Image: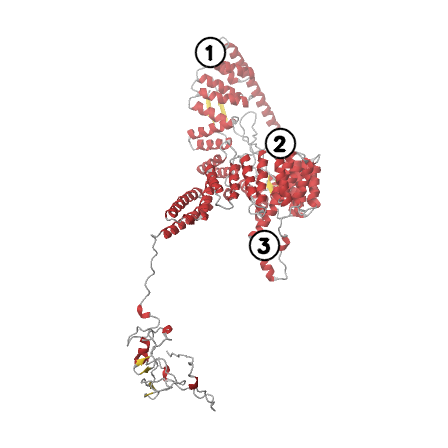
Amino acid sequence: MSISLHHLPREGEMENVHLAVEEDDIYSGYNDYNPTFDSEELENDVGFQQAVRTSHGRRPPMTARFPGTAIGARPLASSFGSRIPMASSMGRPMTGAVQDGAARPMTAVRAAGYTSSLTRGSNFDPLGQSRGPAPPLEAKNEDTPEEKIKILEKKVNDLIEESCMAQSIGALQLALEKAKEAGRKERALVRQREQSGNAEHINLDLTYSVLLNLANQYANNEMYPEALNSYQVIVKNKMFSNAGRLKVNMANIYVKQKNYPKAIKFYRMALDQISNAHKEMRIKIMQNIGVVFVRMGQYSDAITSFEHIMSESPNIKTGFNLILCYYAIGDRERMKKAFQKLISVPLGIDDEDKYIPSNDDASSNMVIEAIKNDKLHQMERDLKVLAEKFIMTSAKLIAPAIETSFATGFDWCVDMVKSSQYVELANDLEINKAITYLRQKDFNQAVETLKTFEKKDSRVKSAAATNLSFLYFLEKDYDQADRYADLAMNADRYNPAALINKGNTVFVKQDYEKAAEFYKEALRNDSSCTEALYNLGLTYKRLNRLEEALDCFLKLHAILRNSAQVMYQLANIYELLEDPQQAIEWLMQVISVTPTDPRALAKLGELHDGEGDKSQAFQYYYESFRYFPSNIDVIEWLGAYYIETQFCEKAIQYFERATLIQPTQVKWQLMVASCYRRSGNYQKALETYKDIHRKFPENVECLRFLVRLCTDMGLKEVQEYATKLKKVEKMKEIREQRVKSGREGSARGRREGREGSAGSAAGVSTPVLTSPKKASIMDSGHSSNSTKGERLSAKMRSLPGSNEPYEASSPKEIDASYVDPLGPQMERPKTGAKRRVEDDDFADEELGDDLLPE
């Protein structure tokens, strides 16, 4: 290292400064080497080392031997190896030179790392690297009061943060515990400050945060008295600035407690303590006051609040609330004015055209692509949807009230909407007008209103045609329903409701393959269309493609977790797949959703009966009877169960109820009499048989039992009933002979016809499959142990069969869909099931599958 020391000449030495003489060679002297700057020998230079050691001492007096020179006894090494004295160019001694044996201290090199402590022979170490690593930092002394206070403050802040985080994830109890712990530590912190004499330095912000968080957590856990106490502590403390706004929180708690007068009092107190600079906060408080007045039924006071808000800062919610209040008091003119104010409220959102990319600027297109689905645009869309919902609801509410008829009122609302920023809602209001006609059961007017949309734009035309298709489908005018379904599809091929209606019209024609194609297309257009998925499952059931139907209903169950209809269909499919255990599992889920459904309970009883579990079957059949005591199948099974278990007295009430339901069926009355006879009550049995004979004098079984009982009891009427029995049996034989001879005659006629015209189709008869008798309970008079007489063969009829839906409403009925102004919807199927039962006995019911609504 070469060290160059620069000194300014002292006063009086200027005469020794010689100016350089200009020479011919301007580059001469560049290669001259001054041995003074040789740093390699500095370690062995005695004079230099002595100067370094005395650099902190006093500067010695000047003792140069030769005036004008800076070289003493210390010779300088030359390039030839000899040491020669060299005079300074300024005639003054050089720093660090040894003169007369005394070393001059060096004062300008300390910054380079030289110190006077270096000894001869030591290494050059200006950075002090030879001393090793720096000693570790001294640990803080945590025993001091200040450090303890800081640590405690940090713990309190951490607890508040943990409490807020727990509340954000829904762990309300944990949040409350953390808030309470923060309060305890904060009080300990205050006491510690007071003990250390720093009471004036109490952190008020920390105290405020602890109390506010504790009050909020009490409120979140619905511990309202504790929350009010915590808020009261903050509000009453004058040291907390702006604590008056917390009265809004207290008022909210009073609203939850339905203490409305006190809530209004605190809202007004908060309003008084908030300056006019916070306009938005004042508006929100006044809106709360208006809502509380509505809940109290004080509509005039609510109107005052809402009118003030609409004049200062109008918004959609307040405008809607104002219309509701005017509707409550029946003020027609003010309803109209409020509706006009509502549709003129500025939303402050950009036009949708802003998000349509242009073909010119690529950079702007990239920006539009980035922002068209961002959270701000989503918020704007939500605000617009909310505004349209409030306007539609207001129009439907006030239309019948502002004019003499609801049609005139709707027309006025449509005119107002057409002149506002919500022009596209006018057509939706017209469709709502048609739906209102439907609710009033004025189908002709509804159809006429919807037909006016046939010349409108495609979206409105499709919606109207879909509704018309739905109406004609309900009227079973399937041709017109099919026509309007085609019209809706032509106007908007991507309308899933139109495709579903078209599929339904094809379904009733039993073209299930084609219906499935329409349902699939509806699902391709709208994968969330649950009606299409349900109907597709029913179609696969009709096609006996049970595995595909099962897939459809399992997908639907993943979307509609609590739909009893979907779960019943799954149970029915598993039953068809001969997996009764899975069917039982799904039916258990059905009754968990609808515990009072009698048909589901009866079906569970049937499945358990089929599995041989009579006790479980009885439980479910009994529950089904309790909720619907008119199901003849359930009544029959319960009566047969009690007879089988030898409790004939209990079976009587069920057969008596069956008699009330089917008074023309003699077998129920015979079973009542049989139960009396089995239980030993012969007198009651005799009276019952006599009553049956009066109603059905030609019933052979009744006469046989009368003869039997009268004989056993020794009554005089035995001969009379025996005579009647013989007469009835003879008449029965004559009738059977006539029927037999008639059949033989017709058979001879057919044979003669076949002989006259061979190959004619007139003699070919198609067999008709009739339903077998499901239950026949008859009494015979031959023996008490029922060898050929009194037998019970009670079999259970099933609930909806392989092609029958849950809670079917009518034979082969399929629901159509219609389009609501805000989106397509489906009509829900009926919850009660009608049955077709033959008069003579239990015929199989023929029910169609209902299509699932939305």
Report if residue 757 is visible in the image. yes
Q: Position of residue 217 (x, y in %)?
A: 46, 42
Check the picture and name the quadrant holding the N terminus. Answer: bottom left
User: First in sequence: mark 1 or mark 3?
Assistant: 3
Q: Position of residue 120 (x, y in %)?
A: 28, 76
Tell us which disc is closer to us: 3 or 2: 3
Tell us which disc is closer to us: 1 or 2: 1
User: First in sequence: mark 1 or mark 2?
Assistant: 1
> What residue did someone put label 3 on?
372
> What residue did someone put label 2 on?
755
Q: Nearer the viewer, residue 276 or 746?
A: 276
Q: Is residue 811 above or below residue 424?
A: above
Residue at (46% x, 14% y) in the render? 682
> What residue did someone put label 1 on?
711
Q: Quadrant of residue 473?
A: top right
Q: Residue furthest bottom?
A: 24
Tell us which disc is closer to us: 1 or 3: 3
